[in-house]
Image: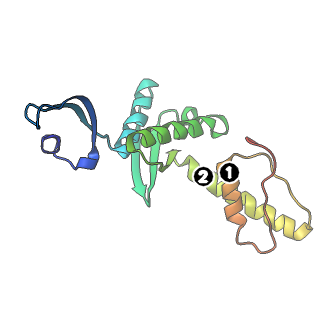
Amino acid sequence: LAIDYFQCEPEELDIEIIHVKKGVFGIGAQLTCEVATRPDPFQSGLDYLNQILVDLELPGTVDGFEVDGVITYVMDCSNNAFLIGKNAKALQSLQTLVQQVVFVNGGVKQKVIVDVDGYRQKQIDRLESLATNIAKEVIHSKIDVTLDPMNAFERRIIHRALSGWAQIKTDSIGEEPN
């Protein structure tokens, strides 16, 4: 009945049995249950980010797309610096929250990226340039270099940018979050 009513597939439904009455040989048996459709995880993340903009009274837009199982949301508002925060901590926190919303509504862990006005791509370009410049300097001077502490996202970019360099070896040292 629920499949016909909601016009969906069985795996799109959450069913909770409320009461079961067995009856005699099946006669008089009753089953009471509560049925709801599962929200779309992608749309849930989009709605969540839009609600954040509304709650913070920031006029703006949120767009999203999914490629190869990675959900990406791009935000743009009147105060992008506020959404990014110092050292992108606000942006990272926002991404963590949205990833939880997507997980709760989808039931499957999915990689989620939240970007504000192209900040992530600018950060990637800046870190790749930094890695290349330092690698050239290390090859020329033969002196090891230690970079300032970075979060996991930044470290991953540095390691990936230098992974193809035969003369360069990268290591992460320290304890989280440094």
Q: Which residue is mark 2?
A: 122
**Label 1 to label 2, Cα distance in Å?**
12 Å
Please name the residue shown 74% across and 64% down the image: 132
Q: Is residue 1 left or right of residue 98?
A: left
Q: Is residue 94 left or right of residue 11?
A: right
Could you tell me the amino acid type at mark 2? Lys
Could you tell me the amino acid type at mark 1? Glu
Q: Is residue 48 above or below residue 111?
A: above
Residue 171 place in picture, x, y as percent:
79, 58
Residue 173 place in picture, x, y as percent:
81, 51
Please tell me whether mark 1 sits on a helix, a strand or a loop. helix
Q: Is residue 9 above or below residue 2?
A: below
Please name the residue shown 92% across and 63% down the image: 143
Q: Is residue 177 above or below residue 172?
A: above
Quadrant location of residue 39? top left
Q: Nearer the viewer, mark 1 or mark 2?
A: 1
Q: Which residue is mark 1?
A: 154
Quadrant location of residue 178? top right
